[in-house]
Image (cartoon, rainbow, N blue to C red):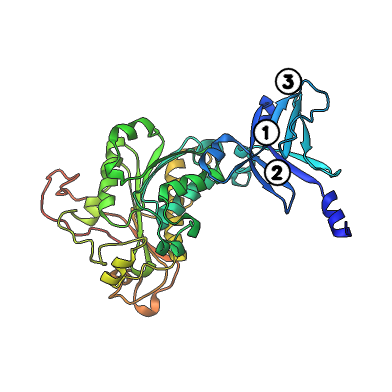
Amino acid sequence: MDFEKIQEALRPYTVLIPEEYRKQRYEGELWGYYHPETKTYNIVQEALYDARTDAKVLGMAVRKEHTGREDGDIFGQFGLSIVWNEEQAEIFVRDNSGSEINIDYYSTRQDVFSRNQGIVEQDRMAAKQAIISGIGSGGFKVGLELVRAGIGSLIVADNDILAYHNVCRHECGIHDVGRYKVDCFKERAADINPNCKIYTFRDLIQHVDPAELEKIIWKDSIILCCADNRHCGYVCNELADKYNIPMIDAGCGPRGSTGEVFWYKPNSGMACYTCAYGEDKGVDYSNQAVRRRFYATETELEKLHFQPGMYLDIQLTAIFETKLAIDILMEHEEGYEAKLLPYINQCTVLLNYPIDQDVNPYMHLFGTEDERRPFTWKSGPAQKNDSCSYCGAEKSSSDIGCNIVA
């Protein structure tokens, strides 16, 4: 062997073991990932390898009193073996030529979220849930950021399948093309926090069986509309009232030049989605002036001459929605300091970058052409309408114009 091969052979192994396995002296198959370039065995728990398709059996773990032998070398068919001597692990790596073996116990609950301490306490976020309608470019990003924040549960609903034209505006890649987006999301979420309970529906939120939703909705929950048209906003407003939970609706304007965020709490006297945006009757959502979108299909692009914008523009709106969702979920938790809620009203329009006002009518909110600056926003209240057919006292059936005051 040359010198480099000798060095490589003597380089230590690292074995990452869940702390829970040590405490319970786990016996059974060890699943996870082996990275030969770093000689690292990353053992993961069942919640993760049930959600992912690429985890492999690395070896076996057994308690010493069950081996029947002193040396513990009973798993020659496996690359890795763990024998528990009390709560201490004795590690055996097949074909090891004398390299040191370093053991590192980890806790997904503590180690993964250690950098969030003092900002969003994980134990409190673990009691929160979000329902996401639409898991495309924006919704996928929102969901993953909530998982990173330590949220305890997510319900995601979308009937769409990832296509090639989605790839440049999505967290997923070419290897995911042809899969349901909700399935991709569950896998990615488990890779960040396997303790987060994910419920998936391969359908639009309005088609999900209400009885199934009733079983899984938590008390401290919020509904997030991340779909590609306003109709879903009306649907989510109804669900918010039905389950008495807050909602946020968000999307992007033409070419991703603006973002739009609306939030609502039931039984609060706030204007509903219909008050703000008018009736959902006879609306032509093929009109790009009213159809704010996170993404579009290639057929629609040809039809509408619509440019959906770059993913980085979409992310700005998604991040804004996520921060607002965390604020609303955590606002009554002792010691939590809100990041957005004190500074915005019910309706907010984000200016990602200025474009022609004929392309995006929201440009008029940001002054004249020479006054408009990227990364700014305008926020204002939505006027409650007593004639609103959904929430108003008069229940008028006439169409109501957009009543956003910005």
Q: Is residue 119 left or right of residue 363?
A: right
Query: What is the x, y in percent for residue 265?
Result: 32, 43
- Would you name the residue on which mark 2 appears? 41
Residue marked by disc 1? 19
Residue type (three-letter) at the residue carrying disc 2: Tyr
Quadrant containing the N terminus in the rendered view:
bottom right
Front residue of 200/361: it is 200
Residue denoted by label 3 = 66
- Figure quadrant of residue 279: bottom left
Residue 278 numbered mark, or none: none
Mark 1, secondary structure of its residue? helix
Real-space Cα distance between discs 2 and 1?
15 Å
Neighbor class of circle 1 (other Cα within 10 Å; few <14, some 14-19, many 20+) is some
| Residue 267 visible to the viewer | no
Q: Residue at x 29, y 36 (%)?
A: 209
The three-letter code of the residue at mark 3 reads His
Answer with the quarter of the image where residue 131 lies: top left
